[in-house]
Each structure stands twice: as C-alpha cells, then as structure tokens.
Image (cartoon, helix red, strand yellow):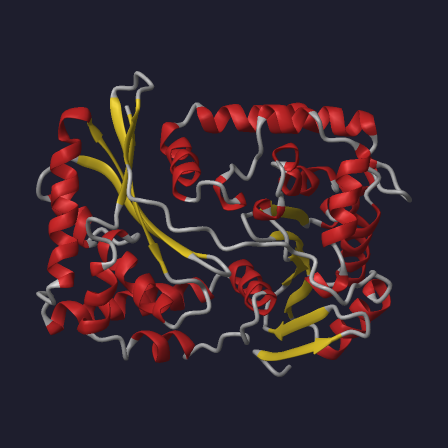
Amino acid sequence: MNVNETIVTTLSNGLKVVCRQVETQAEYCGVFINAGSRDEIKPRQFGTAHFIEHTIFKSTLYHPASYVLNRMEETGGELIAYTTKEETAVYSIFPEGHLDRAVELIAELITSAAFKPDELDNEREVVLEEVLSYRDNPAEAVYDDFDELFFKDNPLAHNILGTTKSIKNFTTKSCAAFRDRFYVASNMVFFYLGPKPPFQVVKTVTREMSGIPTVTQPVSERVAPAIVKPFDRVIRIGSHQSHNLLGAPICNRNSDERFAFSLLANMLAGPGMNSLLNVALREKNGLVYTVEASPSFYSDCGQMTIYYGCDKKDSARCRDLIFQEIERVAAKKLSEDELQRFKTQFIGQAIVGRDNYEQEALSLGRRLLFGFKPASPNDIVHKIEPITADELAACAEKLLPPFTSRLRME
C-alpha cells in the first residue's frame, strides 16, 4: 500500500475526483455539491438546499425509502449529509469492502430522489421542528439574527434552514428543479479516503457517476455582499443571560490573509483553555462560561465573529475586556514567546485533527470543490510559521471599532 498517496482526476463529464489511500479498516466517500443557502435567491426558496439534503434520503425513482435507510446501515456503516451557506455534502462511512455499494447508492440519491409529496410532508414537519429548536436556543439564534443584519439584502443573510413560510411551500417540482440545476457533475467533487488504491476507486466512480449530467455554463448567480454600516442592536427575549455577538468583515477564502485570521481567532478564543479571551473573561474574572471566536471564509467575502454569554449587567465589561485583548495584539504587545506558543498550539491542533479520518476525508473534498490542492501534512506548518506580529496586528485592527458590529439577545 502506498500510504497517503493522493490523486486528483476529472471524469469525462467534468466530475472531479480526489482519493487518498490510508491504512484504515473503514472507508469514507461522498460528494460535495457547490450549492448552499446563498444560492436561494428568492424568499420562497429559502431553505431549499437544506430541505433537499434531508429528502434525498427518502425514496428514489428505483427504490423505496426502506432500501435507502438500510443499504449502508446493514453493513455497519452510515449515511451522512449537511448543508452550509455555500456547499452540500452527502457521504458515507463504512467498514472496508463496501465501496461499490456506497458509490452506487450516493449516485442514486443525488440524481434520482423521487421527492414524493407524502414524504416531503413528513420531512417538512421534521425540518420545522429543527427551526423551532434553533429559535429556542439563543446561543444559536444570535448567529442567524446577526447574519440578517451583517449580510443585509444578500442571500448570505438568511437562515440555512429557511423560514416557516418557505418550508411549507416546497413541492416535488421546486425540489427537483433546484436539484437538477445544481447537482450536476461540473458543480461537484467526489472524495474518497481509505485503504483501496486510487485507481480502483476511480474505476468504481467512473462506472457509477459518469452518467451524471453536466453543464458548461456557471450554475451559480452569487453576488458579493455590500459592506454594511456598523450596528449595535439589542433583541429583548426575556432570558436571564445576555447572548452577545461581535463581528467584522474579513478576507475571503482565496486570500492568503486567511491564515493570519485563523491564527488570530484561535489565539483570541479557540478551543484552548489558554486562549486570550478565555483567560481574560473566564479564568481571571469569572464573567462567562463560553467565549468563542469564529472566522468564516466564503468565496467572495469573510466574517469574524466573537460570541460570549454572560449576565446582563456584565455585557459591557466583557466587551471592553475583549477589545483590550484585540488592541494588545493590534499594538504588537504579544511577546515573541507568546506568539510562538500560539503558533505551535494551532499547528498541533491541526495535526491532531488529521488523525480524524472523517474530517480528513471531508477536507479533501472541500478543498478541491473550492479550487485548492489537497493539503499535505506539512502545509499547515508552512502557512502558519511565517506569520509575523505585524500581520496579526493588521488583522486585529480590522476587528476594532468603528468596523465591528454588535448584537445581543437578552
């Protein structure tokens, strides 16, 4: 076995295929479709991408829902899907030896879902409950409400799940129309990670997916959002805790600056207990249970958010402490030892993450979908180590007032 051999090829219909051979007893494969909630232009379409992700797991033109539900599960495997603002993933994880079954099933789901009215009605209730569950969780809802303000008048603004009104109006015809437009070979990537040699994987994918239709013209109508004026809003929901989100525009995923922003987010409020904001807000002052910094990189824009939940009376104090830490980075007051420690920590987290085969497989597909080469083990080192205090300072300055927008729910 040529461990970690990675190949990228393109089928005759335009479907890109990326395979990585690793020593594992499980196999991971699926497709990424370059379609998400921002491709829903009109309000009546809001939530379509996510709804289709749910309903392709029902019956197909060739098999009943029971077949779909049991096809991978009876091997000990599973079918998984998710939707974001810019992509949809449909994939399977299964014990070694069932690749043909998985690829055949995934191909059938993405091309031949039946979208039967009764099945749509059943799943409609499931998705409506999902919408309500998010609204019942202010720590989640604040992100959606923030995006509505931050990306105002752009499809990036609306909730991935859609609205109660739009979800109730989805039909067999509308679901099939969205699927037929975006689920085309030229708008997809197939990915595989597992013990099979890449040439065998490509042979299977060619047999099962060469018939997927393609188009030569772009299928997306994405328009970059305008930069909105900074805002400071309060939404009264009668909760005990104040849920706060700060945000600022940053670079898109094609900019090299994204590595500095990723390092900055991890330093400020990444998963480490030693992050600057966790120490300042929680460890030193006991003001919050959770503080998180999240960079989001889209094809034509980006966003950095910082979330914290606290007692209402502490909201302003927490915000001041956050800005103090950002200002410290902007003023290049981090020592060289501090900076190197955070670089080493970030790189270490990335290396540990690579031991998660599911995430590595998904990373293969996502990178190719958005035009990047598969990452090598040393890529993260080469991107993070050269970042200077000046580069971090420039990124930090972009998060400071008057650029930062604020929203709190309480």
Observer able to see residue 15? yes
- Residues 18 and 359: in front is 18
**Residue depicted at x 74% and y 49%:** 72
In this rendered view, identify the residue nearer to me: 6 or 334.
Answer: 334
- The image shows residue 194 at horizontal and vertical percentages of 64, 68
How far from the left and from the top, in percent, is residue 342? Answer: 22, 66
Where residue 14 sits in the image (x, y, percent)? Answer: 76, 70
Residue for point 21% across, 54% down: 275
Residue 209 found in image quarter = bottom right
Is 86 placed left or right of 298 in the picture? right
* Residue furthest bottom in the image: 2
Farthest residue in the right direction?
A: 62
Check the image and report above or below for 99 versus 246: below
Q: Position of residue 246 (x, y in %)?
A: 28, 43
Quadrant housing the N terminus: bottom right
Task: Tell me the residue at 29%/53% (across/down).
Answer: 270
Residue 296 visible: no
Quadrant in the picture for residue 129: top right
